[in-house]
Image (cartoon, rainbow, N blue to C red):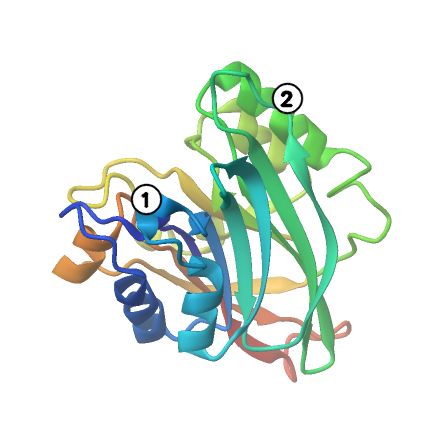
């Protein structure tokens, strides 16, 4: 699952991390990439939202602050039902007048499969997203020899299917939704009340078979954040054949 939680402040103006946790729990993901989390910030009650949500769900987690403001932090996290090993966390090229952007890369041990998962939140301008995606495609991230399949790149890309960012990532990975039958593609996530754009994406490498993609349509989900979560149910393929593979939701 990838989910921009908007500091857990919903469209109703309420700061409710437990509402976010409830929505995630209802979809039962194994791996969750969260963007726009507050940790220790006064505006959201000085709560560590990453830890609070992970503890409520009974999941391991890693948090990376893209920005340090006041006496707290703001950034992205990856949660998992399976053990996590941090690989890399760092900032992406950002403009002075825009919040800093970052990425978080972890390795998850899922029943004998080592999965590389990268979570990111890209910038608001096309020029900045271009440079950020180029860095992620480079030797420090997706181009790193340690970033071997199966690999998942997900997050709030602030970019649609026709964008440079989308086509750049598609050189190495495949949009999970494009691996589904045409009638089930293009599930929009923003804005949550009446979504008409696909800004949140899950890209997968070879060795991953996509079964379904789901987005909740409940009023709670529409209220909890300005984005809806995107859940991809996938299967990690055996090196020799698809049968005998391990199913997982993310």
Please say if the residues under marks 2 and 1 sit with CB atoms less than 8 Å apart.
Answer: no
Which element carries disc 2, helix, strand or loop? helix
Instruction: From this view, report whether residue 105 is shown above or below residue 102.
Output: below
Question: Which circle marks residue 129 in the picture?
Answer: none
Residue 228 coordinates in the image, percent (x, y): 29, 51
Residue 125 coordinates in the image, percent (x, y): 46, 18
Q: Callout 1 environment at 10 Å: few (<14), some (14 to 19), or many (20+)?
A: few
- Would residue 245 appear left or right of 140 to someone viewing this image? left
Q: Residue drawn 42% across and 43% down?
A: 200
Which element carries disc 1, helix, strand or loop? helix
Q: Is residue 1 visible to us here?
A: no
Q: Earlier in the sequence, mark 2 or mark 1?
A: 1
Residue located beneath label 2 in the image:
131
Residue located beneath label 1 in the image:
43
Q: Nearer the viewer, residue 212 or 17?
A: 17
Q: Is residue 121 visible to us here?
A: yes
- Would residue 242 appear left or right of 158 to someone viewing this image? right
Instruction: From this view, report whether residue 236 is shown above or below residue 104.
Output: below
């Amino acid at each position: 699952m990838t989910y921009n939680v908007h500091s857990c402040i919903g469209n109703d103006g309420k700061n409710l991390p437990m509402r976010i946790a409830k929505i995630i729990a209802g979809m039962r993901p194994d791996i969750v990439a969260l963007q726009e989390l507050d940790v220790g910030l006064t505006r959201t009650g000085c709560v560590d939202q990453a830890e609070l949500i992970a503890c409520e769900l009974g999941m391991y987690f890693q948090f990376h602050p893209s920005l340090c403001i006041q006496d707290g932090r703001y950034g992205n996290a990856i949660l998992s039902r399976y053990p996590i090993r941090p690989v890399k966390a760092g900032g992406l090229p950002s403009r002075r007048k825009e919040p800093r952007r970052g990425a978080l890369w972890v390795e998850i041990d899922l029943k004998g499969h080592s999965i590389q998962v990268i979570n990111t939140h890209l910038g608001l301008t096309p020029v900045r997203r271009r440079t950020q995606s180029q860095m992620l495609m480079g030797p420090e991230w997706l181009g790193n020899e340690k970033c071997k399949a199966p690999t998942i790149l997900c997050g709030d890309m602030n970019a649609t299917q026709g964008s440079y960012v989308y086509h750049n990532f598609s050189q190495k990975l495949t949009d999970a939704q494009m691996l589904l039958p045409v009638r089930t593609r293009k599930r929009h996530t923003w804005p949550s009340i009446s979504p008409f754009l696909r800004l949140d994406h899950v890209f997968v490498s070879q060795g991953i078979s996509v079964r379904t993609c789901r987005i909740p349509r409940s009023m709670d989900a529409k209220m909890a954040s300005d984005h809806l979560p995107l859940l991809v149910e996938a299967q990690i393929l055996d090196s020799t054949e698809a049968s005998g593979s391990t199913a997982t939701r993310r």
